[in-house]
Amino acid sequence: MKLDCADMFRPLFDGKVFPTFAEFADLLEQFEQESGTVFRMRSSKLIRGDNIVRYKNIRYQCDRADFQHVVRSTGVRHTRYKSTNCPAHFSVVSAADGLRVRKWCMKHNHSVNPELMEQHRKFRTLSKDEKQIIKPLFECKCSSQGIKLFALERFGKRLTSKDVTNLRIALRTVSHSDQ
């Protein structure tokens, strides 16, 4: 459980140039899994018509930072997410040869643990292809436990019971709209 991830971040990103956004995003996901952190895009400026670099600049913040957003909730439902106003952040800018990480701070004000990353929503979400593979299990009314076990063995993703319920509803809605 580390608080400062600079030793892991520096060799991967500091001074490096990424020719494409996809290369940067892949390395960021690898860093997140290895360090036990999750970063979200706080703001960005898109370059229209450029599908390789895609962004003029991007600011990422730890997902435990206090994001200012419109809250429509009445506060009745239980939420697991708690903001800690984490100061960890970094900026990515477009350069002539690709994307570069410009300034960064990797000091978190909460514990980070790579072993807990499989529980984070970002790493439990199934891709479109994975949903298509798992869809027949829902159609044959497989148990939630069976679906969770299949997802873990096939995709390495540890779904929660709520994830399975949400998938069941989403796939049912899609199949009804197809008819």
Image: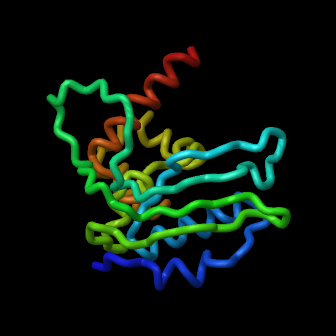
Can residue 111 be seen? yes
Of the pair 170 and 42, the residue shown nearer to us: 42
Residue 33 position in % (x across, y down):
45, 70
Can residue 133 be seen? no
Of the pair 55 and 105, the residue shown nearer to us: 105
Q: Is residue 102 above or below residue 128?
A: below
Residue 128 position in % (x across, y down):
58, 43
Which residue does the image show at 24% across and 50% down from the upper left? 82
Can you say which quadrant of the picture contains the N terminus?
Answer: bottom left
Residue 166 position in % (x across, y down):
36, 35
* Colouring style: rainbow
Based on the displayed image, in which of its 4 quarters is residue 162 positioned?
top left
Residue 87 position in % (x across, y down):
37, 62
Of the pair 105 and 114, the residue shown nearer to us: 105
State left or right for residue 50 relative to residue 151. Answer: right
State left or right for residue 48 relative to residue 116. Answer: right
Which residue does the image show at 17% across and 39% down from the upper left? 78
Of the pair 134 and 124, the residue shown nearer to us: 124
Based on the displayed image, in which of its 4 quarters is residue 102 positioned?
bottom right
Which residue does the image show at 42% across and 75% down from the upper left? 35
Based on the displayed image, in which of its 4 quarters is residue 137 positioned?
top left
Q: Is residue 162 above or below residue 21?
A: above
